Image (cartoon, grey):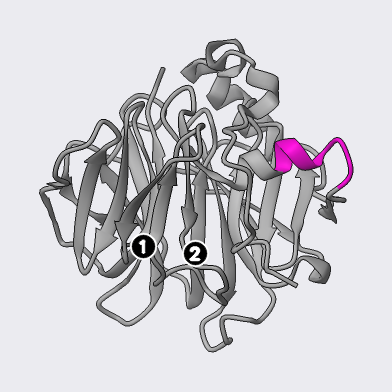
């Protein structure tokens, strides 16, 4: 059976949440702060893990995965204007697949023991970017190896794509009780859209691997697929992701390259203190 990561999908671009307006669902910063502190059941007395580095909820940024000088796999943040890549996790765990909440005030990602193999179970973490508190959730084994996280358009739901399927749960303040999504259910379309790599705002294309079969999609050729089914090959790049309303980004070595959907040559992002093996980017900007 073909894995969920490598599944052959329709070229039709599915707009999340039945094409509802982005502005209708997004919170303003004040609402985000109040919501995230109550949602995660936190006292709000902690500091942001990005204090004095990035203004959470106010300026665009990305989160990515990389290897730290001490050899740990950690999360880094970077302003979209470039500059310093800021490490903000320092655990002895392996962290990957970050996904920024629609408000920019929280981050979901996957975590597993540093010595565990890549096919071992992972825990989902929701990190409050305002006060550094966390919520954890276990994932059902039936979805296979978890690869990618997606939020619902309004930030009230979470989805995790695995090799064998997708799991869904209500986001905090719910208990994040993940369950596999039936491919024939009404929940499959929003789950598939949330965990797909859609580019453009509103989405005008999706990114998929060009390979027929795979185990891990990280080192395979990727394609941009337009609504009419036309494929544009990106080549063997690492974990492409959405960048703004009209571009995508991907990694080549320790370089971060930006590619306009309208075409042209990729543009290199100027950044410093880049981690080794950067990958798994997630983009956010205020409305």
Can residue 50 be seen in this snapshot? no
Mark sitting earlier along the chain (2/1): 2
- Specify the quadrant of the image occupied by residue 259: top left
Range of magenta residues: 184-191
Q: Nearer the viewer, residue 139 or 28?
A: 139
- In the depicted structure, whether residue 182 falls above or below residue 140: above
Q: Quadrant of the C terminus?
A: top left
Foreground residue among 143 and 75: 143
Residue 82, quarter of the rendered image: top left
Taking depth in this image into account, of 221 and 114 the one nearest to the observer is 221
Q: Describe residue 2's horizontal placement relative to residue 213 as left or right.
A: right
* Point 27% across, 54% down: residue: 86
Q: Residue 186's spot in the image, x, y percent?
A: 86, 35
- In space, the residues marked 2 and 1 are separated at their CA atoms by 9 Å
Residue in view at x 57 percent, y 33 percent: 13
Task: List x then y, in percent, for residue 121.
Answer: 69, 76
Q: Position of residue 29 (x, y in %)?
A: 47, 19
Bin the neighbour count of mark 2 within 10 Å (Cα to Cα): few under 14, some 14-19, many 20 and up.
many
Question: Residue 279 bears which disc, if any?
Answer: 1
Residue tagged by mark 2? 96
Residue 238 falls in which quadrant of the image?
bottom left
Secondary element under disc 2, as helix, strand or loop, is strand
Side of 71 where 121 appears, left or right: right
Q: Is residue 182 left or right of residue 162?
A: right
């Amino acid at each position: 059976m073909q894995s969920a990561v490598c599944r052959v999908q329709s070229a039709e671009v599915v707009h999340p949440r039945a094409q509802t307006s982005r502005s209708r669902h997004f919170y303003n910063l004040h609402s985000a702060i109040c919501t995230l502190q109550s949602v995660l059941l936190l006292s709000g007395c902690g500091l942001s893990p990005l204090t004095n580095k990035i203004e959470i909820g106010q300026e665009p940024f990305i989160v990515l995965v990389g290897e730290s000088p001490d050899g740990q796999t950690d999360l880094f943040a970077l302003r979209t204007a470039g500059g310093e890549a800021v490490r903000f996790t320092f655990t002895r765990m392996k962290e990957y697949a970050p996904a920024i909440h629609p408000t920019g005030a929280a981050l979901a990602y996957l975590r597993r023991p540093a010595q565990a193999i890549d096919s071992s179970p992972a825990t989902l973490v929701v990190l409050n970017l305002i006060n550094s508190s966390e919520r954890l959730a276990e994932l059902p084994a039936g979805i296979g190896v978890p690869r990618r996280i997606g939020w619902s358009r309004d930030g009230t739901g979470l989805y995790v794509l695995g090799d064998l399927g997708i799991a869904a749960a209500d986001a905090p303040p719910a208990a994040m009780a993940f369950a596999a999504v039936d491919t024939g259910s009404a929940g499959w379309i929003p789950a598939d859209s949330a965990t797909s790599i859609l580019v453009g705002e509103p989405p005008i294309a999706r990114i998929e691997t060009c390979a027929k079969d795979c185990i891990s999609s990280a080192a395979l050729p990727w394609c941009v697929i337009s609504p009419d089914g036309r494929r544009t090959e990106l080549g063997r790049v690492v974990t492409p992701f959405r960048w703004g309303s009209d571009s995508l980004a991907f990694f080549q070595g320790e370089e971060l390259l930006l590619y306009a959907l309208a075409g042209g040559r990729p543009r290199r992002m100027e950044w410093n203190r880049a981690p080794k093996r950067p990958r798994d980017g997630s983009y956010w900007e205020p409305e």
